[in-house]
Image (cartoon, rainbow, N blue to C red):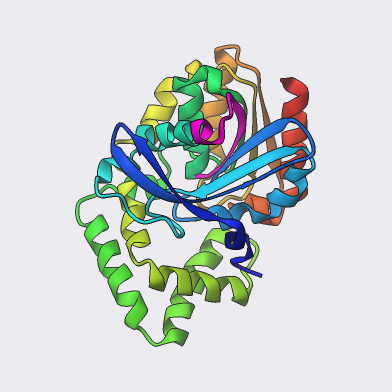
């Protein structure tokens, strides 16, 4: 069932250089010593990584949270708390809160970009990276369009309008865009209904889709790729319609040229929502990473 993950989640207040933020977080104990911090994408939530929780618990402790302004986490007062460096610092503050000296970071899409930035700036806090359909370089189409003038305002207006549309129309619109993201698979109706309800209750999410693209995050990642020293496994769908595979390869190739320990796994016939479409392969990538560390 959609939303069951939130039954064990709690609100949490953390402070970064950009100011205080509140997030909805979940941490589970595991039977082995490894530690995993899951970072979701834009405009997702930790629900997108739900299929990984059970298998990862057999490998160690697992934690995840809805980034500020997404899922069930409120938007911070300072919009600067949504830029790439602030979100990377937030991940480190989460490690501090958990009492973890380091962790394996598993990031999907924009969360993969956040994970990369943590590894670039806080080497000692990252044992390894598993990057699922990660943000890459150069910027893909969405991240070229969303920072343009007027886009944030248009998304904010769409967010305000959505709760007032007749539910069949609202669900149809949400389903259309979700199917674009899930292609070549199709999303099930229960997921569409849940996402529509979540966006209707939290209309700020659509505006924040544009906010997190400010500051040229893909350029930042490209410039710092050689600074990633930790073992890294990229897992990307060969037909990802959101972040085409060549953009993730752009980061991988920079790491490879710098002699960094990295592997790239391409999965034929798989799109952007890789944790839901190929959870077994994602978990296998985690096991491969553990062997590399």
Q: Is residue 279 at least partly visible in the picture?
A: yes
Counting labels gives 0
Q: Nearer the viewer, residue 48 or 263?
A: 48
Decide if residue 289 is on the left or right side of residue 17: right
Q: Residue at x 60, y 76 (%)?
A: 189
Vertical position of residue 291 compared to residue 25: above or below:
above
Please identify the quarter of the rendering in which residue 103 is found: top right
> Can you name the residue that lies furthest to the top here?
259
Q: Which residue lies at the image location 54% right of the left edge and 35% below the top edge?
A: 248
In this picture, residue 224 sits left or right of residue 229: left
The N terminus lies in which quarter of the figure?
A: bottom right
From the top left corner, tell me how far across and down residue 140 is, in percent.
43, 43
Vertical arrangement, residue 91 with respect to residue 257, above or below: below
Quarter containing the C terminus: top right
User: Residue at (30%, 76%) from the top-left corner?
Assistant: 161
Q: Is residue 158 left or right of residue 140?
A: left
For the point 46% across and 69% down, which residue is it?
A: 198
The magenta-colored residue range is 95-109
Residue 65 image offset from top left, x and y in percent? 52, 48
The percent coordinates of residue 14 (x first, y second) are 40, 40
Q: Nearer the viewer, residue 179 or 46?
A: 46
As for residue 100 lying within the magenta part, the answer is yes
The answer to if 285 sits in the magenta stretch is no
Q: Quadrant of residue 35?
A: top right
User: Would you identify the image quadrant in which residue 158 lies?
Assistant: bottom left
Q: Is residue 269 visible?
A: no
Q: Is residue 258 left or right of residue 162?
A: right
């Amino acid at each position: 069932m959609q939303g069951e993950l939130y039954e064990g989640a709690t609100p949490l207040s953390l402070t970064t250089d950009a100011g205080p933020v509140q997030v909805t977080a979940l941490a589970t104990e595991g039977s082995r010593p490894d530690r995993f911090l899951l970072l979701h994408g834009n405009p997702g939530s930790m629900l997108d990584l739900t299929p990984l929780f059970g298998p990862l618990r057999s490998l160690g402790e697992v934690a995840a949270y809805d980034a500020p302004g997404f899922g069930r986490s409120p938007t911070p007062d300072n919009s600067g708390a949504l830029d790439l460096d602030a979100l990377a610092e937030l991940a480190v503050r989460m490690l501090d809160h958990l009492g973890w000296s380091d962790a394996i970071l598993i990031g999907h899409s924009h969360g993969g970009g956040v994970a990369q930035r943590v590894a670039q700036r806080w080497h000692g806090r990252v044992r390894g990276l598993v990057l699922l359909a990660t943000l890459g370089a150069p910027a893909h189409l969405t991240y070229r369009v969303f920072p343009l003038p007027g886009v944030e305002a248009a998304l904010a207006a769409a967010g305000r309008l959505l709760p007032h549309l007749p539910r069949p129309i609202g669900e149809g619109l949400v389903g259309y865009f979700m199917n674009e993201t899930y292609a070549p698979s199709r999303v099930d109706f229960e997921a569409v209904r849940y996402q529509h309800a979540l966006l209707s209750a939290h209309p700020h999410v659509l505006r924040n889709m544009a906010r997190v693209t400010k500051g040229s995050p893909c350029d930042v990642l490209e410039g710092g790729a050689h600074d990633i020293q930790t073992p890294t496994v990229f897992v990307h769908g060969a037909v990802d319609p959101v972040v085409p595979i060549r953009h993730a390869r752009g980061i991988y190739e920079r790491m490879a040229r710098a002699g960094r320990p990295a592997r790239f796994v391409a999965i034929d016939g798989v799109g952007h929502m890789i944790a839901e479409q190929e959870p077994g392969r994602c978990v296998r990538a985690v096991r491969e990473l553990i062997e590399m560390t």
